[in-house]
Amino acid sequence: MIQRALVSLLEISRNESDEDSWRLISGSLADISEALAVFHPHRATRKITVFGSARTARGEPAYAVAKELAEVAVAQGFEVMTGAGGGVMEAANQGAGCENSIGLNVDLPFEQHANRYVSGCDGRLLHFRYFFTRKLFFLRESDALVVLPGGFGTLDELFESLTLIQTGRTPPIPLVLLAPEGDDFWEGWERHVHEGLAQRGLISPEDSSLLMRARSAHGAIELICRFYRVFHTAQFGADRLELLLHVPFPSSQLGQLNHAFADLLEEGSIQPGESCDDNGILRPCLRLQIDKRRIGRLYQLIDRLNSLELPPCGALEHPGERLCAVEP
């Protein structure tokens, strides 16, 4: 892969001498290099990204909810990522504290200056040259997304995330829409999405399962923790998907699971097995060949797994840890 990357650069150099093109290439590679260096020490901890308006004032309910959300997330072992700006982002970084915050800033002529709660955090603030590299790392490094009310930028981040999740370009992660009590921001948005898009056949009815909604910081974190109760992560291969789990799926229930989710399978059946995660830990898994147009049904399958009645197990009690070892 290193050779292919170098060959690609050499091929570009033979055909492209425009300074603007090389400024783009150089800036993109610098963004990626710097981001990989910042995130490398934090691979063992799950991260929750908080999206929301930079214009949310400190006295507004959404500001207080974002701050509390980050406090509760850290208490459960998560780190908190934001766009490093003001408003909701500032509140989340304040709630998480310097030692648990990561800021992904992008330089803009107005509004987007790194907030004081992350600007002084050594090794935890990134300055991206481009929006597209910043978005890449938001999704690449996030284990959950919480979206509070916001404008064009917030909705852009929400739709970008939904698109990558729906098309299977990013592994399944929980996506929570959060607004304070009495704020109907997401009700109207969801009504348009489900009634306007689903009824016209522009999205699948089960795509509503890609989203969860919460009315409090504690409610949002509970949804995220539940998502990782049994499910650990997903690994897409060339011809199959592996759902890595914290504990083995009961063999006695495998037939019921195959019957209930036969419409999700492109062919074959759901089969148990074992597979190594990105950190080399061997975990129980379920292997299946899915119809990638049915990602909403995949989320329903994950919800079914997380609903299993299981005996107490240490591997189920640390939702913020990626490396939590499987107990026998």
Image (cartoon, rainbow, N blue to C red):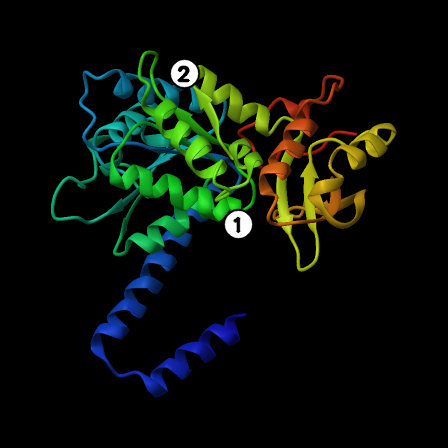
Residue 143 seen in this snapshot: no
Above-or-below relation of 206 to 136: above
Q: Amino acid at mark 2?
A: Arg
Check residue 167 in the rendering and tell me which mark sits there, or answer none: 1
Q: Nearer the viewer, residue 21 or 169?
A: 169
Q: Is residue 287 visible?
A: yes
Query: Could you say where residue 171 lies in the image, as x and y percent from the top left?
Result: 56, 45
2 left or right, relative to 232: left
Instruction: Examine the rendered structure and indicate whether residue 4 appears above or below residue 235.
Output: below
For disc 2, the marked residue is: 215
Q: Residue 280: where, in percent of width, then height?
A: 66, 48
Left or right: where 47 falls relative to 180: right
Label ID, residue 32: none
Are discs 1 and 2 less than 8 Å apart at CB? no
Q: Is residue 106 left or right of residue 145?
A: left
Q: Is residue 170 above or below residue 299?
A: below
Q: Which quadrant of the structure image shows residue 285?
A: top right
Dot 1 or dot 2: first in sequence order is 1
**Neighbours of disc 2 within 10 Å: few (<14), some (14-19), many (20+):** some
Task: Please identify, in this view, whether the residue under mark 1 or under mark 2 is nearer the observer.
Answer: 1
Q: Secondary structure at mark 1?
A: loop
Assign a secondary structure to mark 2: loop
Count residues near mark 1 (Cα–Cα under 10 Å), then give few for <14, some for 14-19, many for 20+. Answer: few
Q: Residue at x 33, y 27 (%)?
A: 148
Residue extending farthest bottom: 14
The amino acid type, in three-letter code, at marker 1 is Thr
- Give coordinates of residue 169: x percent, y percent: 52, 52
Point 33% across, 19% down: residue: 184
The spot of residue 78 in percent (x, y) is: 47, 29
Residue lying at 47% horizontally and 48% vertically, measured from the top left: 164
The residue depicted at 54 percent of the width and 70 percent of the height is 1
Residue 90 location, quadrant? top left
